Each structure stands twice: as structure tokens, then as C-alpha cells.
Amino acid sequence: MSNIIKSPLVKSGEKVTINNSRIQRVIDNKKDNDDNQPMIDRDKLLKEAKEEAESIVSQAQAKARDILTNAEKEVANLNSQTQQKIQEVIEQGKAEGYQQGLQLGREEGLNKGVTQLQNLIINLDQKVVEFNQSLEERESEFKEDLIRLAIAISKKIIGRELKIDAELLKGIIQKTISLLDGEEEIVIRVAPSDIEILATYKEELISSNNGLERVKIVSDENIQSSGCIIETDFGGFDATIDSQLAEIEARLLEVDNDE
């Protein structure tokens, strides 16, 4: 019984400023909703996490547009400075040619000005190319970082609510068991801190699931509180919060990359 199958229980859920008040409202709404919902609704969590990620990504895109606008202004300013420099170089070349009083001197001054002008134009073009590349890289990094931030926020919300309401853990286990097909015996691995609480639900788990005759509860230090792995003769269901949120994160990043 070593094969671990990802359980689809939860499908929820330069500087970038994130609206803390909006995040707090998400947390408060989550607490209110969980008072009437003992089991984690995977689709709802995925939707909330995705909406929050999309909102934060939208902020990042707005920030990127601001950066691009500022860059365009800087390029325009640099063009103006370049034109001024060109004029200064030309005037300097003329002055040098005039002072020498010779045609050769004038030609050398003009050639020097033209050379400096060409170098300035080449340098300007390179700076613009480098800036555009940097902007594209930053925008991609913003999206990935903000998706991971949304997942981290969801993880904290879920973990806190599970610690407050032990009934939620029972709900997770009940729903996972309902996915099994006529198993007579299962092993439930939980964190040491949850084993005593879960033991009180053992008989209820057996009686509420047709065909289930034996339930063995095992303490596992590798499992975080409020998560579990249910093992059968045919494999296991990973119902830990970390594994479910990792699946959500992977799906959100996959959608972002497709765009």
C-alpha cells in the first residue's frame, strides 16, 4: 500500500503592492462561510484562489503598463538629450574647424561629431532593447510570484480553520472514503496531534460507510495537522492540504503559461 494517488478533494483555492484589506475580506468571508460548511468545497476554494490570483495578476499588469509608460517617457527624454548632445558635438566640431582655419580641421571636427553621434544612437537602441527584455521577464515573474502568494494565503486560511474546527477534518475523511469502491478495510494516517480527536469518530466512520468494516488510525509525523492519507489494498488517497494546494498552484501556473 505504497502508491499515493492525488486526491481531488479541493480544487479551490522595481515593487508590486497588494491590497491587504481585500485579502482580509477574503479571510473574513472564508471564516463566515466555514461556520455552515464543515467540508472543504474543492471547486469553491479553487475559484476563490483563482479569482484572487487573477486580481493580483491584474495589479501586476497595471504596474507593468506604468513601467512601460515611464520607460517611453525616459526614452523620449533620452532622445531629447541625444539631440542636444549631437548639436553640442556639431557646434564643437565647427568651433574647432573654425579655430584651426583649415578645411582639414573642419572635416576632422565634423567626422568626430558624426562618430560620436553614431555611437550615441547605437547605445540608445541597445538600452531600449535591454529594457523591453527586462520588462517582459519581470511581468512573467510577477504573475508566478502572485499566484504563489495567493496559494500561500489560501493555505493559511484553510490551516487555521481546520485547527479551530475539528469537524472539518472528519468531513475531509468522510468525503475521501466516499470515493472508495466497497473497501472493507482502510488505514488512515494522520498527524500525531489529530489522532486522539479522530479516534472518537472511528465507529461513526465505519457505520456511515456501507461495506466498511475495519478502520485503522495510524500516527504519522510526516503529515501536517488537519491532513490525512487514506490507504487501501489498491493504493492511497493523499488528502493533505499541502498536496491539494500544490495541485491547484500547478494548474494556475499552467493556465498562466498557456496565456
Image (cartoon, rainbow, N blue to C red):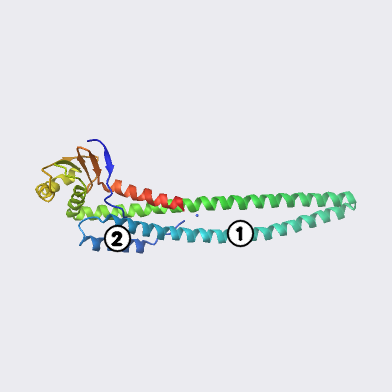
Amino acid type, label 2: Ile
Q: Is residue 2 above or below residue 254?
A: above
Picture coordinates of residue 143, whole percent (x, y): 44, 53
Question: Taking 213 as reference, is 96 left or right?
Answer: right
Residue under the image location 74 percent in, 52 percent down: 117
Q: Nearer the viewer, residue 176 or 159?
A: 176
- Residues at marks 1 and 2, CA–CA distance in whole angstroms: 41 Å
Picture coordinates of residue 217, whole percent (x, y): 15, 42
Q: Which residue is mark 1?
A: 74
Image quadrant containing the N terminus: top left
Q: Nearer the viewer, residue 105 or 194?
A: 194
Q: Which residue is mark 2?
A: 27
Question: Taking 257 as reference, is 157 left or right?
Answer: left
Amino acid type, label 1: Glu
Picture coordinates of residue 128, whole percent (x, y): 62, 53
Q: Around disc 2, counting alpha carbons within 10 Å, would you say few (fewer than 14), some (14 to 19), or many (20 or more)?
A: some
Question: Taking 222 as reference, is 79 left or right?
Answer: right
* Label 1 secondary element: helix
Residue under the image location 79 percent in, 49 percent down: 112
Residue under the image location 73 percent in, 50 percent down: 118
Q: Is label 1 or label 2 in front?
A: 2
